[in-house]
Amino acid sequence: MIKPEISWTDFEKIDLRTGTIVSVLDFPGAKNPAYQLEIDFGNLGIKKSSAQITELYTKEDLLGKQIIAVVNFPKKQIANFFSECLVLGVYGDNKEVTVLTSTLPVKNGLQIG
């Protein structure tokens, strides 16, 4: 089912950026299996995120991986952790998540449009 149509103005409000994962920790306090990530967004600094991506990725797979994230959501508390951005991914048939990334390395913090 497709979601309701949005306007171009609605889309322009979403701040999508490239970043590189610089830290990956297990998140035992999360309701569903997840990692606590720290992501370098260049001039925007380091932001934290909780990501339910444990099914397809090990911590070693993620460290140094460049990803795409929404960086202008308000902080969201998940257990004792505050998530500052949303790492984007594709849901598979069994709800496993494949992380979105660039096909070539790009500068951290660049805007997606």
Image (cartoon, helix red, strand yellow):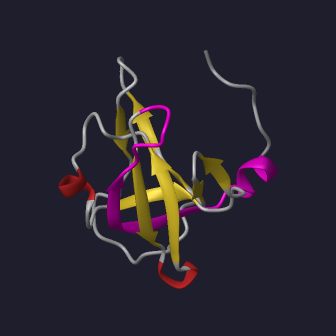
66 is higher (above) or lower (below) than 81: below
**Drawn side of residue 80 relative to residue 42, left or right:** right
Farthest-out residue, left: 60
**What segment carries the magenta color?**
8-32
**Drawn side of residue 46 relative to residue 93, left or right:** right
Q: For the point 75% across and 26% down, which residue is it?
A: 4
Of the 4 image quadrants, the one containing the N terminus is top right
**Drawn side of residue 76 relative to residue 51, left or right:** right
Q: For the point 42% across and 39% down, which residue is it?
A: 52
Nearest the viewer among 45 and 26 is 26
Residue 109 part of the magenta-drawn span: no
Q: Position of residue 39 (x, y in %)?
A: 43, 67
Q: Position of residue 99 (x, y in %)?
A: 36, 45
Q: Position of residue 94 (x, y in %)?
A: 35, 18
Farthest-out residue, bottom: 43
Nearest the viewer among 9 and 108 is 108
Q: For the point 75% across and 30% down, which residue is it?
A: 5
Q: For the point 25% across and 37% down, which residue is it?
A: 56
Number of numbered discs visible in the structure rendering: 0
108 is higher (above) or lower (below) than 82: below
The answer to which quarter of the image holds residue 7 is top right
Of the 4 image quadrants, the one containing the C terminus is bottom right
Nearest the viewer among 113 and 107 is 107
Residue 13 part of the magenta-drawn span: yes
Q: Position of residue 24 (x, y in %)?
A: 33, 60
